[in-house]
Amino acid sequence: MGKSLNLCIPGLLAGSAVSPAFAQDKYDIVRSSCKADLQMSASACECIVAKAKTQLNEKETQFFIANISRDNNQMMALQQNLNANEAMNVMNFMTQTPTQCQAQ
């Protein structure tokens, strides 16, 4: 079975304003988690970042970051802001994208 990003569905940064510094840092968190947790190559991790930027909306991205950061309190808070389609999109992203990017 393929690798998947750590998925715990409990939350996101509740629609707060995101500074440009945070915008860059959040993708650095994805890169770090990808390398450390999934032991994927730099190019595979860049593939995941690129897909996150195009396939996840801001709420979904915030939830994804909270999840891979293992910030349970933030996940719980953010989960309340996701509708069913957004929650499904994040789950699918986290389970399918590593496999899609693995060969990069």
Image (cartoon, rainbow, N blue to C red):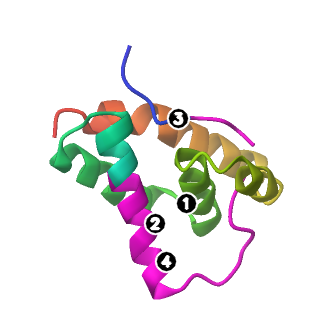
The CA distance from mark 3 to mark 2 is 16 Å
Give the mark, 1 or 3, whose residue is nearer the N terminus.
3
Question: Disc 3 designates what residue?
Answer: 6
Give the mark, 3 or 4, whose residue is nearer the N terminus.
3
Q: Secondary structure at mark 1?
A: helix
Q: Secondary structure at mark 2?
A: helix
Answer whether residue 51 is visible to the viewer in this image.
Answer: no
Residue type, numbered disc 2: Lys
Q: Nearer the viewer, mark 4 or mark 1?
A: 4
Tell me, yes or no, whether the two marked residues, 4 and 1, touch with CB atoms within 8 Å: no
Give the mark, 1 or 2, whose residue is nearer the N terminus.
2
Tell me, yes or no, whether the two marked residues, 3 and 4, touch with CB atoms within 8 Å: no
Picture layout, residue 96 above or below residue 35: above
Q: Secondary structure at mark 3?
A: loop
Give the mark, 3 or 2, whose residue is nearer the N terminus.
3
The CA distance from mark 3 to mark 4 is 21 Å
Q: Residue at x 70, y 79 (%)?
A: 16
**Residue 5 colored in magenta in the image:** no
**Residue 25 colored in magenta in the image:** yes
Question: Disc 4 designates what residue?
Answer: 22
Q: Nearer the viewer, mark 1 or mark 3?
A: 3
Bounds of the magenta segment? 7-31
Residue type, numbered disc 1: Thr
The CA distance from mark 1 to mark 3 is 14 Å
Question: Disc 1 designates what residue?
Answer: 61
Q: Secondary structure at mark 4?
A: helix
